[in-house]
Image (spheres, rainbow, N blue to C red):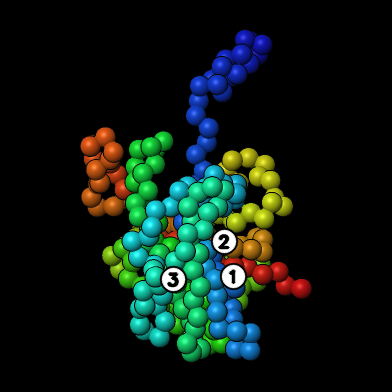
Amino acid sequence: MIVAFRPLLAAAAVFLPTAAFAHFQQILPSADILPEAGGRSVTLDLVFTHPFEGGPVMDMAPPVRFGVLSGGKTADLKPALETHAVDGKRGYRAAYRFQAPGDAVVFVEPTPYWEPAERKFIVHYAKVVVDFASGDGWDAMVGLPVEIEPLVRPYGLWTGNLFRGVVRKGGQPVPFAEIEVEWVNDGSVTAPADPFVTQVIKADASGTFAYAMPRAGWWGFAALVEADAPMTAPDGKPAPVEQGGLIWVKAVDMK
C-alpha cells in the first residue's frame, strides 16, 4: 500500500499549484529614527513583493497617492517619486526632508493590482513612521480605507518586543480581522516549511492584535479585508478586491 501511494503523491505534486505566498506592499525608509544631529533626510523605497522569500517582485504601476502626515498636515509626495527597478520590475524611490522635528507617517495607496492566479484585485494601503528628534505623532491616523492604528510606538523597538495594533476599516474596528505578518529576509533564514514564511494571526473582538517580533529587521503587518464592492476584471466580469492595511515596524537587537 505504501509503495502504491508514493507514485500517487508524485503525480499529485506535478499537477497541484505551488503555494501562493502573501503579497506585501513595502514602503521602507533608509532609517526609522533620525537624530537631530544626523541629518533631516530619509530615502523611501516602494516595492510590491514577497518579503520573506525575497520575491518574486510584482510590477508596480504609478501609485494613486503617496504622501506624508506630519504635524497634523498631509503633504503630497508623488512629485518626488522616481522609478526604481527591482529584479526587472517597477518599484519607486523618493527622498523626504523634514522641515522640523516631528514624526512623519509616510503612506502609499497603490494602483489596484490584478492577480490572475487568485482572480482578484489587491490594494494594500501601506504606511511607515519615521521619527526626527521628536517622539510625538507616531499614532496619528492617515484616514486610509483600511488602516492599522499602532498601540505601541512603531520605532525604537527591541527584538522580542510585543507590537500591538487595532485594525480599522472606515475608521471602525474590525472584529477578528486576519493579519499576515512577514519579515524582510536578509538571506540568513530558510523557512523549514511554508507556514513559517507568512505568520497568520487574528485580532480579537475589538480588532486588537499583538505579535512579538523574534528577529531584528523590518516586519510587515498586513490586515486583510474584502472591499465592499467588486471591480471589473480584465475579462469584463466582476472580481473581488482584497484591501490591506499595512504598517512596517523595525526591531533592533539589544547589544
Locate residue 124, reporting x and y percent: 40, 56
- How packed mark 3 is, by other alpha carbons closer than 10 Å (few <14, some 14-19, many 20 or more), is few
Relative to residue 212, is residue 118 depicted above or below?
above
Which picture quadrant has residue 143?
Answer: bottom left
Query: Of residues 235 and 160, which is closer to you in this image?
Result: 235
Task: Choose the circle earlier in sequence order: 3 or 2.
Answer: 3
Disc sitting over residue 30 in the figure: 1
- Residue occupying image coordinates x 52% and y 76%: 130
Cα gap from disc 3 to disc 2, whole angstroms:
25 Å
Q: Are marks 3 and 2 in contact (CB under 8 Å)?
A: no
Of pointers 2 and 1, the one earlier in the residue sequence:
1
Q: Identify the residue at horizontal 62%, vertical 68% (top origin).
A: 251
The secondary structure type at the circle numbered 2 is strand
The x and y percentages for residue 59 are: 45, 48
Which amino acid type is shown beneath numbered disc 2? Answer: Trp
Q: Is residue 184 visible?
A: yes
Q: Residue furthest right?
A: 255
Residue carrying label 2: 219
Q: Give the number of the mark in front: 2 or 1.
A: 1
Residue at disc 1, secondary structure = loop
User: Which residue position is annotated with label 3?
Assistant: 80
Q: Residues within 10 Å of mark 1 (few under 14, many from 20)?
A: few
Separation of residues labelled 2 and 1 (CA atoms):
14 Å
